[in-house]
Amino acid sequence: LDQSTGTSESSSINSGALTYVNISESSREIYELLTGQWNNLFFPNLLVYSEQFDNAAWNKIRVSVLANQATAPDGTLTADKIISNGVSDPQIFQETDLLITSGDVFTFSVYLWTDAGQPTDVRLFIFGNQFSTDSMITAKDVSLSTTPERYNISVTAPAGVTSTALVSRIDLSENPDNGDYIYSWGAQTQKGAETFYKKTTDVHSKSLVIAG
């Protein structure tokens, strides 16, 4: 079975009293099922438009996005260029409404890189929409190279969590010049630790388990 990015297809496996049905994903999900990678199967990508940072689902603060500007890790011309307008604290983020309970762990991952001569400092955030009161927030500084690399950051919901949405955010260089940029592709936020990347468009990736 293919463990890589793969192509989209529909599949199903019958295992005793349960039939596992894959919706809009590749044979990776069957691989995950057979190898016990339950987090990825039952808690898939919570983001939408995971490869389309120009989409309105991604909130853009002091940045613009040009679609399909570089070759992505899967070999397609689908990586986007995120460009700073020269004002401090440029960022792009997506907010996801969901039920959050104490002890839940969420991981945001994304492929990032840049060209020679561009700033390499980027900061990733993942936080609850009420982080100022429940302290559900994590930040991570990363240094980009000219080779695509998947970076990740996790946050754990604290006791007494009040957040009802999760924010996944990429901050470019804090004090950029107008036109500074990075490349991005394959964003994913999931419950649990980082697992295989799952592409999404207008809906979250999903799998079903049907009794029968």
Image (tube, grey):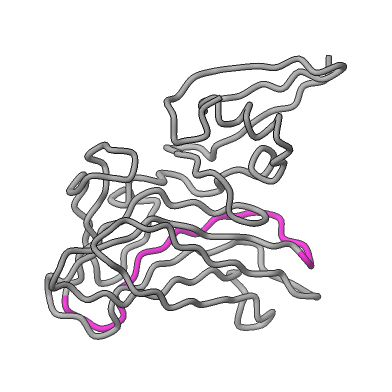
Point 63% across, 60% down: residue: 106
Point 66% across, 68% down: residue: 163
Q: Is residue 3 left or right of residue 113?
A: right
Classify the position of the C terminus by image quarter.
top right
Q: Is residue 139 left or right of residue 160?
A: left
Position of 175 relative to 157 (above/below): below
Which of the two residues, 108 or 31, is positioned nearer the viewer here?
A: 31
Point 77% across, 21% down: residue: 210
- Whole-percent x, y for residue 71 in the image: 22, 44
- Residue 59 image-quadrant placement: bottom left
- Whole-percent x, y for residue 200 in the image: 46, 39
Which of the two residues, 32 or 158, is positioned nearer the viewer here?
A: 32
Classify the position of the N terminus by image quarter.
top right
Q: Inspect the magenta stretch and tell me whether residue 88 lies in it.
A: yes
Decide whether the magenta segment is chiefly helix, strand or loop: loop
Position of 1 relative to 131 (above/below): above
- Whole-percent x, y for residue 97 in the image: 60, 55
Q: Is residue 187 left or right of residue 99?
A: left
Q: Inspect the magenta stretch and tell me whether residue 67 lies in it.
A: no
Position of 136 relative to 205 (above/below): below
Q: Is residue 117 left or right of residue 171?
A: left
Q: How many marks?
A: 0
- Whole-percent x, y for residue 139 in the image: 51, 77
Point 66% across, 53% down: residue: 191
Which of the two residues, 164 or 17, is positioned nearer the viewer here?
A: 17
Q: Residue furthest right?
A: 17
- Residue 129 image-quadrant placement: bottom right
Q: Where does the magenta region start and end?
A: 86-103
